[in-house]
Amino acid sequence: MLAGLSMRRWGAALLLVSCAASSDLLQRLSRAHFDFTLGMYTTLVNVTDDRQQNLLVSPYSVFSLLSMLFLGAGSESLSSAQLRAVLRFHNISYASVQKAFKEVTQVLDQPYYWRHFRERSLLQLSSQVAPDSIYVRALAEYYGCMNQTYPAPADDAAEFFGCAVNNQSELAEPAAFERLAAWLRAGSSGDQTDLEGAVRSALADRPVLLLLSRVRFHGRWLHPFDPARTFSKGLFFSEPTQRLEVPMMTGRLRVPLGYSADMEARVLELPLVSRRISIFLLLPDDMERGLALLEANLTMDNLRTLLATLKEAVVNVKLPRFRLEDSGDLRTVLMSQGLTDVFDPRSADLTGIDPQGRVHPGNLFYSTSLVLDESVEASDWMGDRMAPPTDSRITDKYFEVDHPFVFLVWDYHSAMVLLMGRVVHPQPLYQQ
């Protein structure tokens, strides 16, 4: 898939994509996707009232769901124009978008991702609307989307990747809430009371279409952390005067490290096994104001400046062991980005989905979780094979994640941002 992967410089593929994408179409789609990612994340930060709140979203999953709407938008309509603008499809044709997504789908449906990234999306139509057969076939061709009856939550939780379009349920029926709520919480151990309340409220409005995204991520490191070296009472300062005790993983790793004085932030790349996926940790210098400054300046140019500084080094890493879960409705975020026509029942034009023009999405609900742990059982630990000789420690660098930070999970083969978020309060792996 990636003949040029060995030629990439750390971080360069994330910015230029040329080494990570297998075709010109995928390169152009990835550039649009990355621009969309930063725009959506910035808007999510701005509409979130609580600055101390953890955030986690899957830009890939949202991007693909909106691209499915773009597939069904009426040509030359305002709905299509707004989707194109929000998705940053400025220099890529309608047909090229779909062909490029077919490449992405083929990559992410490979067995490698089953261990790390489980993404499911659902276009839930009212039973009163039968999706156009041509649209259904196009979804299957380009997105691997199946037209199926609503699966039982337990069966659906076993699926690793993919999407479905469904019109087998009357959304006004009480049973619809139970099915949708169970679908969203499958594979999650967190409290989703707020999300379930939002779903119940949305169903009361008798929607014609709901968009749903569910993502579960648990990465396996290329260089695992030694469980025996995890300090159970590490300190994490959510604010300068507010400290939390969290398990702190430690490791001495040869990984890419960078720093930008202009952004007042450091960056560390932690690759997963096979180097197909990497987690980039963006850690601001200032413990008190640094997170707000970093998020306010997350532009493409600034991120390019920061990632361009990445150089391989021997790094003593301290990273909290934690889980992160987030859920909600992205309708307000997307409307704030300019996607208003699609959500308006009076003007939405999704006649490619329903030629009679009855379809508009009521909401886009998401449920996302991430686990960062040692990725190895203590009994299986084979020792730190990546550690250089001890006499080189004078040149070691240090990266201690002890205060709020931003991160993104990047897949080099599909050239997509799988997850992006911020950690202000690391959550324990298991509920107390």
Image (spheres, rainbow, N blue to C red):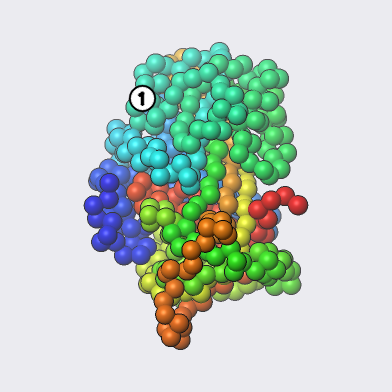
Which quadrant of the figure has residue 110? top left
Task: Report the front residue among 429 and 295.
Answer: 429
Q: Which residue is mark 1?
A: 138
Q: Amino acid at mark 1?
A: Ala
Residue 60, visible in the rendered structure: no
Residue at point 47%, 69% (across, down): 384
Q: Residue 246: percent from the left, percent from the top?
A: 68, 64
Q: Residue 274: percent from the left, percent from the top?
A: 38, 54
Please tell me whether mark 1 sits on a helix, a strand or a loop: helix
Residue at point 44%, 37% (across, down): 64
Task: Report the front residue among 198 and 191.
Answer: 191
Residue at point 50%, 39% (across, down): 119
Q: Residue 172: percent from the left, percent from the top?
A: 66, 18
Q: Residue 174: percent from the left, percent from the top?
A: 71, 20
Residue 21, visible in the rendered structure: yes
Is 172 drawn above or below residue 6 in the view shown? above
Task: Report the front residue among 25 and 118.
Answer: 118
| Mark 1 nearby-residue class (10 Å; few <14, some 14–19, many ≥20) | some
Task: Report the front residue among 361 and 136.
Answer: 136
Q: Is residue 350 left or right of residue 244?
A: left
Q: Is residue 263 left or right of residue 45?
A: left
Q: Is residue 357 left or right of residue 237?
A: left
Is 428 drawn above or below residue 10 in the view shown? above
Residue at point 43%, 31% (across, down): 68
Return the residue found at the far front.
379
